[in-house]
Amino acid sequence: MRYISTRGGGSPKTFEQVVLTGLAPDGGLYVPNEIPHFSATAIAGWQGLSYQELAFEVMQPYAGDCIPEESLRALIDRAYSNFRHASIAPLVQTGSNEWVLELFHGPTLAFKDFALQFLGHLLDYSLAKRDQKAVIMGATSGDTGSAAIEGCRRSKHVEMFILHPHQRVSDVQRLQMTTVLAGNVHNIALKGNFDDCQNMVKACFSDQSFLPENRQLVAVNSINWARIMAQIVYYFWAALQLGGPQRKVSFAVPTGNFGDIFAGYLAAKMGLPIEQLVIATNQNDILHRCISANDHRTLPLVQSLAPSMDIMISSNFERLLFDAYGRDGAQIAALMGAAKRGHMQLSEAALQEVRQLFSSHRCDDTKMLKIIDQVYTESGYLMDPHTAIGLDAARNRRANGVTPMITLATAHPAKFPDAIKRAGYVGEPELPVHMANLFERPERFDVLDNDRAAVESFISQRVVT
Ligand SMILES: *Cc1c(COP(=O)(O)O)cnc(C)c1O
């Protein structure tokens, strides 16, 4: 298996090469040069596998000859060993033929653990094999940072620098990052907003001369292919629990950077019978406007109660458009130029192609709070704000009552206590036991100005050579 850039430049790369970097040099994202396909019979043969066994079957073709089978199995076993539910990703019923797939039983209580626990072990394995060290640099508006830190804190081969906007993440989110006191973990509170953090990371990736020799930056956001790959697994997992592949299923996915739902698209391409993929957005609804009305204009970002979906340009959408435009890198490069200038319009053919599988829905804060309350009243089930937006999309967009509709529950409600209380929940949604004393733990982080020289010198002084 080889990987190519969505913008058509450069030569094909191996799995390990693309995992150990960020964007392709031409600014594109890496995608496999072909998507592996499984027959319904092959997929039916996976019924009854454990989550880890299934993960091996789904991911092995993507890793290909880069990772021997027994090593891949060991990496997967380690990645999911500290999830707190025996099923790893349990399904809960919330209505007639309506299900929620709980993806928050990992160490940081959000679905990002599925990919980042795996990526941490994978990086350690690949770097050890090459006798290399790497520097992880990432920007976070909350969930990515803590999941990446949890995934890589034990790695002997990586040094991590995670930037969050100073005083603009929730207390739980900050503490989940800053109370990890491992020597290779460095939290930077940047005086700026999330965009400033992201622009800083981009600038550092574009010129890495501030790093010592033989070091390179590795991205841990969802442009990293390994993250997408690990997320494909739970689509197969959920479908197999509900009668797939003989029976079709549909998914509604709370969407920000389009990484999670893009994994669902790949599952469909790999042969899993999926009827619908519903993109759920909050007030930052550019994807909903694009799918429903071919309106991909960039508008100012609004702060919502579902902050992990407060994103204007969704990076992974480019990976979908690459397929919708017949894998024509030159067209994608032009299209992304237009998106960057603030207005991208899809061709009618590409839009029709995307709409075969995808539909979209927008749910604002007011509606989101209502649905948390409604579902809690109906069934005693408490959802986090992101999941609630997904469920609202599921209920509004499902094509029929026959096909099971599965909403991805992307975070534990206790991560967002303010929203839960505003929805009318009496009391405090409880943090799981392993995090109960979070507020008493010592913290460590550095506050830096939004200044590239300051950030670069902070990093270069701390990278152990
Ligand atoms: C990251 C995140 C999302 C958005 O996922 P994408 O892959 O960026 O679309 C949704 N909900 C929660 C809780 C998240 O942490």
Image (spheres, grey):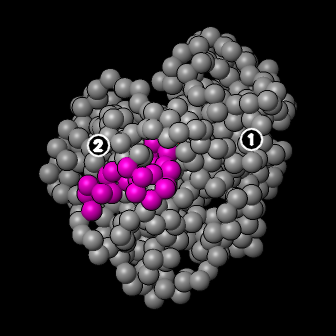
Q: Residue at the spot x=29%, y=26% of the render?
A: 299
Q: Is residue 370 left or right of residue 435?
A: left
Residue 392 location, x and y as percent? Answer: 33, 51
Residue 399 location, x and y as percent? Answer: 23, 65
As shown in the figure, which amino acid type bears the numbered disc 2? Arg
Provide the secondary structure element on which disc 1 rests: loop
> Between marks 1 and 2, how big is the CA–CA gap?
34 Å
Q: Nearer the viewer, residue 434 or 13?
A: 434
As shown in the figure, which amino acid type bears the numbered disc 1? Ala
Question: Which badge, 1 or 2, comes first in the chain's sequence?
Answer: 2
Q: Nearer the viewer, residue 128 or 281?
A: 281
Tally the numbered discs.
2
Q: Which residues are magenta?
A: 374-398
Vertical side of 337 occupied by 288: above or below:
below
Circle 1 Cα neighbour tier, 10 Å, few/some/many (<14 / 14–19 / ≥20): few
Name the magenta segment's main secondary structure.
helix
Provide the secondary structure element on which disc 2 rests: strand
Residue at mark 2: 362
Q: Quadrant of residue 323?
A: bottom left
Q: Residue at the spot x=68%, y=23% of the render?
A: 188
Residue at mark 1: 436
Q: Residue at the spot x=66%, y=53% of the render?
A: 106
Q: Nearer the viewer, residue 418 or 411?
A: 418
Confirm whether residue 427 shows in the render: yes
